[in-house]
Amino acid sequence: MPTYEYRGLILNIPEFDQEHAGYFEYARRHQLAVKRCLDCGLLRWEPGPSCPFCTSLRWEWTPVSGRGEIYSYQIVYHTVLPGFRDWVPYPIVLVELDEQRGVPTPGYGLRITANLVDEHFRPEREERVAIGARVEAVFMDLPNGLTLPQFTLSGEPPRTPLWRHKE
């Protein structure tokens, strides 16, 4: 089982773990991938083996654009992980990807949780984080061979007015 180090944390990723191997293979090619159900065709980010829409166990990894908007966010002021102490405060974002908005029901979206980083892969400044801000996937290539998808502000104009948590 390959072992990787990220910010002082040890990550164990089994070589033959079908649940995650495809995700990391696409990430190495700098593509964001999600699961697509082979029966109903819907996309999902949930890591489970079955489709939450039709319960099928048949799926495949499929690349997506990696573009979307911040659906929600949280600023972490006190981390429990020692490797992130020098990042505090840092944003964790829930990104709604552009694919599959309002499907299978209104209000549903393909959402993924990630770090929001700047162009140097440092945490984005708190005052720049807002619900509705446009983002895109970027890929952090670690020296040990692992590539981690992150998100960064894209500079695209927002589709709706931006909203920030009150301080």
Image (cartoon, grey):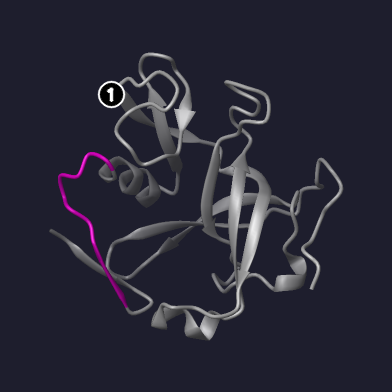
Q: Give the range drawn in magenta.
A: 9-19
- Please determine whether, in this image, residue 34 is positioned above or below residue 105: below
> Observer-nearest residue: 21 or 26?
21
Expressed as whole percent of the image width and height from the top left, the position of residue 76 reads: 58, 73
Residue 52: percent from left, percent from top: 42, 28
Q: Does the magenta stretch include residue 143?
A: no
Kindly indicate the quadrant of the structure image that contains residue 68: top right
**Pointer 1 residue:** 57
146 or 74: nearer the viewer: 74
Q: Which residue is drawn at 17% across and 61% down?
A: 2
Q: Name the one closer to the observer, 102 or 23.
A: 102
**Could you tell me which residue is drawn at 57 percent across and 81 percent down?**
88
Give above or below for 57 relative to 146. above
**Is 17 one of the magenta-colored residues?**
yes
Quarter-of-image position of residue 140: bottom left
Q: Is residue 26 left or right of residue 164?
A: left
What number of labels is visible?
A: 1
The kind of residue on which mark 1 rests is: Leu
Q: In x, y percent, where is residue 40? A: 43, 14
Main SS of the magenta segment? loop
Residue 85 position within the rendered picture, expressed as x and y whole percent measured from the top left: 49, 84
Q: Is mark 1 on a helix, strand or loop?
A: loop
